Image (spheres, rainbow, N blue to C red):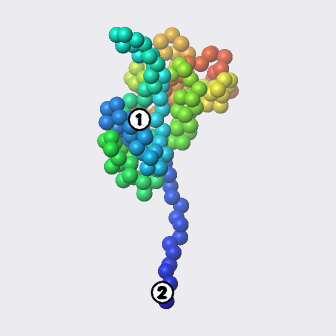
Amino acid sequence: MEKFRIKPNHYVDYSWYVWYTKPRAEKKVRDRLVAKGIETLLPLQRELRQWSDRKKWVETPLFSGYIFTYISQRDWNTVSFAEGILTYVRSEGKAAVIRPDQINQIKCITANSESLSLVDEADIQIGEMVDVVAGPFAGMHGEMVNYKGSNKLAIRIQQLERILLVHLPANYIKSLKRA
């Protein structure tokens, strides 16, 4: 009787990756990946859209053309060959990995904010580092900016070259320099 050697169960390393999708296919890609058992994140924002005959609130992707997945290397081909995926986002020639704290910040912001906007880095001047001390974002860190006349917390997502902005009352924010 031949004995079979069982390979030890190696620790599987999961990370958050960013993928480019076909234009306006983000929700369909998310649904396909979830059906395959892949954990995804597609941050959505509510926008009031106006047509010639009506106005309607719609949910649109916060990062148009992008979707986030939490996968290991063994799931790479499942995502890579999914219908609607174009390619992965690269940073320094490798697949861009998004830090878990940035994913958590995105989740928190999209879950708790009606006042949400996204800007290119070139469109904003970065201010001092701040700590949020009150409200639903208490405990988060970011950069304080004055954008279009209002104080907002900026969360920089370097791999996407984007900054996520959330409007916060001034008394919710404390400078880290004075802490």
At a point 50% along the width and 55% down the height, the residue shown is 13
The residue that disc 2 covers is: 2
At a point 62% along the width and 27% down the height, the residue shown is 137
Residue 59 image point, x, y percent: 45, 25
At a point 42% along the width and 40% down the height, the residue shown is 30
Mark 1 burial class by Cα count in 10 Å: few <14, some 14-19, many 20+? some
The residue that disc 1 covers is: 27
Q: Looking at the picture, which amino acid does disc 1 mark?
A: Lys
Residue 8 image point, x, y percent: 53, 70
| Residue 140 located left or right of residue 38 | right
N-terminal of the pair, mark 2 or mark 1, is 2
Element at label 1: helix
At a point 47% along the width and 29% down the height, the residue shown is 44
Which residue occupies the foreground of this view, 152 or 113? 113
Q: Quadrant of residue 175?
A: top right
Q: Looking at the picture, which amino acid does disc 2 mark?
A: Glu
Image quadrant in which the C terminus is located? top right
Which residue occupies the foreground of this view, 19 or 89? 19
Res. 152 in view? no
Which residue occupies the foreground of this view, 26 or 68? 26
Q: Is residue 73 above or below residue 66?
A: below
| Residue 10 located left or right of residue 79 | right
Mark 2 burial class by Cα count in 10 Å: few <14, some 14-19, many 20+? few
